[in-house]
Amino acid sequence: MKPFLQTLVVLCIATTLGAETVRFNDGTFIDVVSFEVRDDVVVLVTADGKLQSVPRSFVDLGTLPDQEALIAEAIELTGLRQLTDEISRSARLAASGLDLGALSSELVADAMAKGFDADRLYEVAEETFRGRAAGLQLGAALDWLRSPMARRIEEAETSGSDELRERHSTGLVSTPPTRDRVELLLRLDRASGTSESAVAMQAAMMKALLQGLYPSGPNTSHAIEEALEDARPRLARRTRSRIQLSLHFMYRDLSDGELAQYVSYLESENGEWLSHVLLKSLFAAMEHGARRSGEALGERLKERNKLKV
């Protein structure tokens, strides 16, 4: 993450929707939108966007917002559970068409189901999120997540059937989007790291599966790295193309102005931070699932080879 910049933090929280009241030991109080305890100092961001540092001994710490509750709210508002459920569903679906030759499709599907257990994926993602989400950035992120615009974005991202998606993709051929619209979606993709992270996640998943499936060793590791390096450009092209179509569909009902507002947040210091925390959490879940699936497949392969002897 970039170095902390006070100006950007102030800009991100200047339009706060709700403040918490912090009381001092002398009986006075102040409204804040976020805080961070740093050794003997409490750093507060006030409701009007000002940054203040006060000695910890001056603050009635019992009045500070519950950090755990704030993190739990952020996890809920980002839809982390729904995202890990989708990873689980997609992995199981991919397993149905995965041909590993040496193993039957039933064994592959069983290993993937165990590795990509939805509850376990969420536990890994939640633990990662909690370890990374704290302090002043969390308060600013919650201001965004609670905003009407964020709710509007969430509705756009979760609406639409597969049939409607197909019709929309077909319509793009006859009625292509404007250049401004395409540029906004490209900026959104870059700012959110969607395509880049999707490619990295798929490569990590392939690597973890292969490492679990084949015996470890310098020759094997080198072969796996070479295979991934060869596959990455093709994987990147296919992924970026698919994601661009998905973004066109997902935000079809948002005006250019609304989309620009969302992109501006993602490009801000706080938007970058929130995207980073969320993607790292999902990456951890994906890698965990792939590693467990690869290990399960490797064990099944060993059992199969023993039976042949």
Image (tube, rainbow, N blue to C red):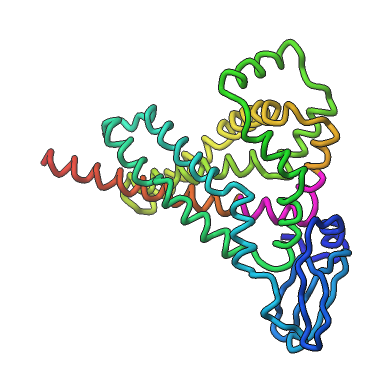
Quarter of the view holding residue 157: top right
The one nearer the camera, 74 or 266, is 74
Question: Within the magenta stretch, is there residue 277?
Answer: yes
Q: Is residue 197 left or right of residue 3?
A: left
Q: Main secondary structure of the magenta part?
A: helix
The spot of residue 261 in percent (x, y) is 83, 42
Q: Is residue 58 above or below residue 157?
A: below
Quadrant assignment, res 150? top right
Q: On screen, 64 above or below 8?
A: below
x, y percent for residue 274: 69, 54
User: Which image quadrant: the C terminus?
Assistant: top left
Lateral position of residue 155 relative to residue 11, left or right: left
Does residue 241 belong to the magenta stretch? Answer: no
Q: Residue at x 59, y 67 (%)?
A: 68
Q: Is residue 134 placed above or below 146 in the rendered structure?
A: below
Q: Quadrant of the N terminus?
A: bottom right
Pick out the residue farthest to the front.
27
Magenta region: which residues?
A: 264-278
Front residue of 232 and 277: 277
Q: Nearer the viewer, residue 273 or 236?
A: 273
**Residue occupying the point 70% across, 68% down:** 135
The residue under the point 75% across, 52% down is 144
State how many labels appear: 0
